[in-house]
Image (cartoon, rainbow, N blue to C red):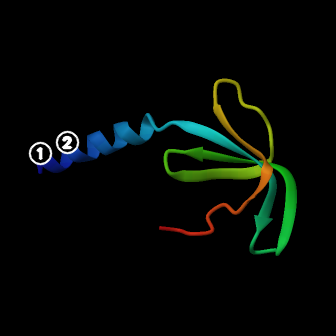
Amino acid sequence: MRRLAIVLLFVSAAQAGAATLIVRAGRLLDVNAGTYASDQGIVITGNRIESVGPFELIEGVRVIDLSGYTVLPAFADC
């Protein structure tokens, strides 16, 4: 039981310290709607997509600039 508590504590600490970054997409394909949106931001924390929407710079958050590319977020869920 003690090992489980230590593992859970470690996992919680790792997730709390997960880095956030923004991927700036020139075009983003919405596979559900079958449409493209321009100048979109994908906010990622750890290994999860937190939000997708119009690109906004967040102070102190790393940006990966793919403004010249089309991005397909969550196209493959591994």
Name the one closer to the observer, 13 or 18.
18
Q: Which residue is mark 1?
A: 2
> How busy is the neighbourhood of tag 1: few (under 14 within 10 Å), some, or many (20 plus)?
few
When asked about the image quadrant of residue 22, the answer is top right
Q: CA distance from mark 2 to mark 1?
A: 6 Å
| Residue 31 to residue 54: above or below | below
> How busy is the neighbourhood of tag 2: few (under 14 within 10 Å), some, or many (20 plus)?
few
Residue 76 image offset from top left, x and y in percent: 56, 69
- Residue for point 44% across, 37% down: 16
Label 2: element kind? helix
Q: How many marks?
A: 2
Instruction: Name the amino acid, label 2.
Output: Ile
Q: Which residue is mark 2?
A: 6
In-image side of 73 versus 13 (left or right): right
- Residue for point 37% across, 39% down: 14
Label 1: element kind? helix
